[in-house]
Image (tube, rainbow, N blue to C red):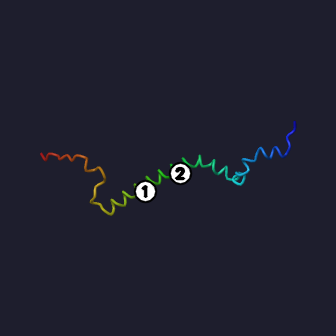
Amino acid sequence: MAISPYDFDTQLAPFEAFAPMGPLVPLALMGWFIAPVQWWVNACLGTCGALSDVMIRSMVYPSLTPIGSHEVPHVERDSA
């Protein structure tokens, strides 16, 4: 039994609403591959930003100690 063009058209009818978005499908699939790259770029730029912030703060306020340095015990040497 042969299929008529009308039967073929009605079988695809539910998907015709998404036909204009067909050219965008590859872009949506690339999102799966781009997401890890965006995460790594964000992590690297955040690290560089934090390090440059510490460097600039240490130049502007040289008397302030870095975070956590007050927890290091100071050992005095005997002057014998």
Sequence-first tag of 1 and 2: 2
Q: In this figure, which residue is indicated by the disc labeled 1?
A: 49
Quadrant of the drawing holding the C terminus:
top left
Q: Is residue 39 above or below residue 64?
A: above
Compare residues 72 and 36 and report the one nearer the observer. 36
Around disc 1, counting alpha carbons within 10 Å, would you say few (fewer than 14), some (14 to 19), or many (20 or more)?
few
Q: Residue reaching furthest left?
A: 80
Q: Residue at x 72, y 48 (%)?
A: 15
Q: Is residue 7 left or right of residue 29?
A: right
Q: Residue at x 78, y 46 (%)?
A: 10
Q: Is residue 64 left or right of residue 23?
A: left
SS of the residue under disc 1: helix
Q: Residue reaching furthest top?
A: 1
Around disc 2, counting alpha carbons within 10 Å, would you say few (fewer than 14), some (14 to 19), or many (20 or more)?
few
Q: In this figure, which residue is indicated by the disc labeled 2?
A: 38
Whole-angstrom CA distance, mark 1 to mark 2, is 16 Å
* Residue 45 picture location, percent across and down: 47, 54
Compare residues 16 and 51 and report the one nearer the observer. 16
Q: Are marks 1 and 2 in contact (CB under 8 Å)?
A: no
* Residue 53 picture location, percent across and down: 38, 58
Q: Is residue 14 left or right of residue 54?
A: right
Quadrant of the drawing holding the N terminus:
top right
Kind of residue at badge 2: Gln
Kind of residue at badge 1: Gly
SS of the residue under disc 2: helix
Disc number lying in front (1 or 2): 2
